[in-house]
Amino acid sequence: MVSLLKLGGSVITYKEKPLTLNIDAIDTICRNLKHVKKPLIIVHGGGSFGHYYSLKYNMHSKPDRYDIHGVSVVRCSMIELNNYITSIMVRHNLNPYTIHPLTFMDKDKPIIDKVKEVARLSEEGLIPITHGDILPTVDKNYYILSGDEIMSIFANIIKPDKVIFALNVDGVYNNMNEKRLIREISAEESIEITDVHADVTGGMKRKLREAFKIASNGLPVMFVNGLKSERIVKALNDEAVICTMVR
Ligand code: IP8
């Protein structure tokens, strides 16, 4: 059975510093992923790469006729970020295999056979890795596809046994003043979300929305601290871990 892991932009980059990787975090995650012996698919976010340029060129999830140079720049920044991550993975003897979202998306709809092929590759020993991106739709419009949305598209089609969102905090807090970790949320509950960073795809609210969608299909979703990456491994290996579970 396949597991789905989203590496949030707040883990792999320093979100408040444009175009800055968190090399230590990526390196530690890769070192730890060697201890995971089951098929894995990774999705990563834009962090201070994609989101930096999306904000600069005023691009959002809503399809529109965005500045065409901006479209190019946002895409390049995501490819660059992906290249950094995959080269660190290879250095750790992992087998990443980048799949750009246009391979499995036809405008704003997933190509089901292609998504299933992604799962097949993970069973053959590769780690398919994809990312949030800027994609064409119709009438010269483009839109930003969030990695969080890719998670729910994949979860819906592949039906993985684990869905994990790695964040830069321990999970979902009741609010940012008290910072009490919510250990379990059921899709019906409403919680107060304050996003600290400007995030063109909707930050924590978006993540939770996608997690609720996934959970409503019977797949529990875990929000785990990716800066304590041994937790990612524990979660993937079915061990108890500090996290927020969305059911
Ligand atoms: O960080 C956004 O992906 P996300 C990708 O998963 C871009 O929402 C291009 C900003």
Image (cartoon, helix red, strand yellow):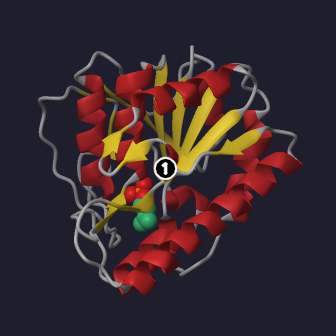
Picture quarter containing residue 211? top left
Residue 28's x, y, as percent? 74, 49
104, 237: nearer the viewer: 104
Residue 197's x, y, as percent? 35, 71
Picture quarter containing residue 187? top left
Identify whether 44 is placed above or below 208.
Answer: below
Identify whether 201 is placed above or below 153.
Answer: below
Identify whether 232 is placed above or below 11.
Answer: above
Name the residue at the front extreme: 139
Residue flagged by tag 1: what amino acid is it?
Pro
Residue hosting label 1: 101
Residue 121's x, y, as percent? 66, 27
Numbered disc 1: secondary structure? helix
* Badge 1: residue crowd in 10 Å (few <14, some 14–19, many ≥20): many
Identity of the residue drawn at 55% across and 51% down: 100
Identity of the residue drawn at 34% across and 25% down: 156
Q: Name the quadrant of the C terminus.
A: top left
Residue 149 in sight: yes
70, 33: nearer the viewer: 70
169, 142: nearer the viewer: 142
Q: Name the quadrant of the N terminus.
A: top right
Identity of the residue drawn at 31% across and 61% down: 201
Identify whether 149 is placed above or below 239.
Answer: below
How many labels, in total? 1
Identity of the residue drawn at 32% across and 73% down: 198
Residue 221 in sight: no
Q: Quadrant of ligand 1?
A: bottom left
Residue 55's x, y, as percent? 35, 80
